[in-house]
Image (tube, rainbow, N blue to C red):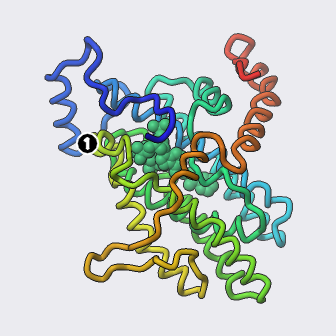
Amino acid sequence: MYGNAYIDPNDKIDSQEESQEKLDAFEARIAAGDKIEPNDWMPDLYRKQLIRMIEQHAHSEIIGALPEGTWITRAPGFRRKLALMAKVQDEVGHAQLLYSAAETLGKSREAMINDLITGKSKYSNVFNYPALTWADSAIIAWLIDAGAIVNQLANSKGSYGPYCRALERICYEESFHLKYGHDNVVHLATGTAKQRQMVQEALTRWWPPIMHFFGPSDKESVHTETLMKWKVKMMSNDAMRQQYLDMYVPKIWDLGLVLPDPNLKKNQESGLWEYTEPDWEEFKRVINGDGPCNAERLAVRRMAEEKGRWVRRAILGEEAAYVIPFA
Ligand code: BYC
């Protein structure tokens, strides 16, 4: 079991409002490929699962802006600085879209931010690692954005209208980020010996967290079955990981870079990639708050909330401006 899941995936129909008849009609709509919209009837568990997943995704976008953001002031050259600034700004914009999508399900943005900065909500494991060199920011932009696209393209065909529409727009922007990241990695991989070494070391550092990015194996996953039944999630964790390996390992090898897994190869008979299992104990520690940068990431978000409080007060008024009880 991965941490303090506050949703029991085996929750049964739990509200008086819910009846088998309504559930059957809801599931028939999903089977027919309809989009569910905010005011439509939905089971409590569908709502809770969507809030959990969209909220975690939104948090991942704003926290995800931090490792690359630290390189804006040190980007090599004006053009790369401009491009990185635009990318980081896009990621924060994605968080806005996703928080808005989650709000349609009844959880306020204030409550979501509060759950982030008090450590109650999760966000993607990968952003709890440091971007030590410029090459790390290039690897993130290419290979983590690539992973996000695999996930988001699949889920944009899902059942909840506001999430799907947000994902569609996010995917357009991520595709551009991926090209930007690829360009940076190619530049380093075809550059001087020192640049090649720098990008190789960054790849070696990021590969295990990237393997974790798609979540635990299907047999360990807690939520996949429920999410796939209701077309919130359109591919299992292992299926996403396999698709990613199929698309990106050949491109990485083409650049002459080495992946830090001697067992990584495609089994020609099964068509599946074989690999050494990444360290799942490390994954659990990182997603539960004990990674190399968790404390630093949340401290930055807390500072942003504290420093921005007067702005929220000025715009929203005393009543609407929340004070976060994290102190
Ligand atoms: N990191 O039952 P499972 C970006 C948790 S940002 C942390 O398989 P599920 C970018 C999981 O939440 C885009 N936690 O879960 C931004 C659950 O815990 P709880 C990031 C993880 O939901 C800036 C437990 O483990 N993408 O690209 O069926 C710059 C059991 O897992 C992770 C998203 O956020 C993880 N990697 O499937 C650059 C995608 N994996 O909640 C780039 C949205 C698992 O029970 N999320 N856990 O306490 C999803 O698609 C799904 O939630 C997952 C996991 C595939 C990640």
Residue 245: percent from left, percent from top: 44, 71
The answer to whether any part of residue 164 appears in the image is no
Question: What residue sits 44% from the left and 71% below the top?
Answer: 275
Residue 216: percent from left, percent from top: 43, 52
Q: Is residue 322 above or below residue 173?
A: above
Residue 296: percent from left, percent from top: 76, 43
Q: Is residue 323 left or right of residue 156?
A: right
The kind of residue tagged 1 is Lys
Question: What residue sits 68% from the left and 32% below the top?
Answer: 117
Q: Is residue 147 left or right of residue 194?
A: left
Q: Is residue 299 above or below residue 323?
A: below
Q: Is residue 79 left or right of residue 210?
A: right
Question: What residue sits 23% from the left and 40% below the top?
Answer: 30
Q: Secondary structure at mark 1?
A: helix
Question: What residue sits 35% from the left and 47% below the top?
Answer: 233
Residue 289: percent from left, percent from top: 64, 40
